[in-house]
Amino acid sequence: MPKRAALVKIGATCRARRTFDFGHWRQDNPAVNPADPRFCGKRVALAIALLVAVTLLAFAPLPRNGFINYDDPDYVSRNPQVRAGFTLEGVAWAFTSFSHSNWHPLTWISHMADVSLFGLAPGRHHAVSLAIHAAAAILLLLALHLASGALWPSALAAAIFAVHPLHVESVAWASERKDTLCALFWCASLLAYVAHARRPGRGLLSAAVVCHALALLAKPMAVTLPVVLWVLDFWPLGRRARALEKAPFLLLSGASAAVTCLAQSQGGALRSLEVYSLPVRVGNAGLSLVKYLGLALWPSGLSVFHPHPGPSLSWFAAGAAWAPYSTGSRA
């Protein structure tokens, strides 16, 4: 081989090795594409079946539960718009109402559809929430598998998502339908985006954007999805971040954040800077983040309500957040 050709080959090899390589899955050797038999084979079907079985077993008592007197009357059992079932008037109300300081029209419509199908039988409402949660776990498994090529680690991560104690509130509380519904479309958007990254196409990217919009219509929690997609570009997808791709996601997140602030403000849930100063807000955010990480590792002392620590909290409290778990930060 001529010396020049050998140098070119060595250079190409070095450039290939500079791609992100975690467990031999690299950009120039994509993990799995949607048409690959490894993505839809028997092992994947077995992983999905086991994931669903574990999820249903963990929440087996749920369909026997009733509504509770905290938020459920406002969101379902005594809400006149929801009790009327799925109607055009109800859909219009869902998109134009800031009821209970929230704007999540898809969640309202979901509750209305349940009433039309099952009346006010709480067990069936809970069963729908469980089915949505199980579907979200399946989508997460597929997205992680498609991104990494590692089936069983992906299945384990999805199982932790499905049965972690921090998710009990979201699945077992009828009023938290917004959380499970948002997670479903969040995971669907993630899967579509990863599939697009593996086999680029406008259809898959458009599907990811649409699913992101649906997630935001269920709960504005999905505003963070664009950041997650940027992280995925770095690892495990091992591709250059494409800012233009993220533009629709960022625009949707910005619009949702603006509408949410308006809804919270009109409902009196958003306090002014005179009540909670910027250092207090930063401190509470840091404290809540660290506490969430702690609860993810050791989920004890869980509650549906964690009161704000109060205006005396300052930003440096976040630095000492690991120790004083007795502080009542909002999770």
Image: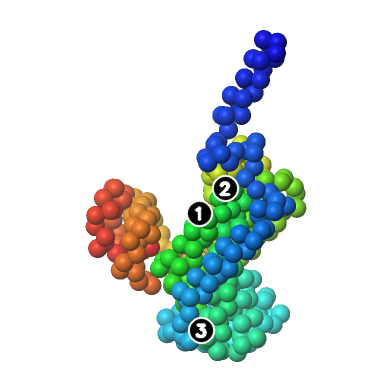
Of the residues under marks 3 and 1, which one precedes in the sequence?
3
Residues at discs 3 and 1 in contact (Cβ within 8 Å): no
Q: Position of residue 267 (x, y in %)?
A: 48, 70
Q: Position of residue 134 (x, y in %)?
A: 56, 70
* Quadrant location of the N terminus in the rendered image: top right
Residue 63, labelled with which disc?
A: 3
| Residue under label 2 | 148
Above/below status of 11 relative to 321: above
Q: How is the image coloured?
A: rainbow
Q: Quadrant of residue 121?
A: bottom right
Above/below status of 38 relative to 42: above
Q: Residue at x 61, y 29 (%)?
A: 16
Of the residues under marks 1 and 2, which one precedes in the sequence?
2
Above/below status of 326 relative to 241: below
Q: Residue at x 46, y 82 (%)?
A: 61
Q: Secondary structure at mark 2?
A: helix
Q: Nearer the viewer, residue 193 or 247?
A: 193
Q: Label 2 amino acid?
A: Ser
Between the C-alphas of marks 1 and 2, the distance is: 9 Å
Residue furthest to the top in view is 3
Q: Nearer the viewer, residue 68 or 198?
A: 198
Q: Label 1 amino acid?
A: Pro
Q: How many numbered marks appear?
A: 3
Q: Is residue 193 visible?
A: no
| Residue under label 1 | 153
Q: Position of residue 125 (x, y in %)?
A: 55, 82
Nearer to us: label 3 or label 1: 1
Between the C-alphas of marks 3 and 1, the distance is: 30 Å
Of the residues under marks 3 and 2, which one precedes in the sequence?
3
Q: Secondary structure at mark 3?
A: helix
Q: Is residue 270 visible?
A: yes
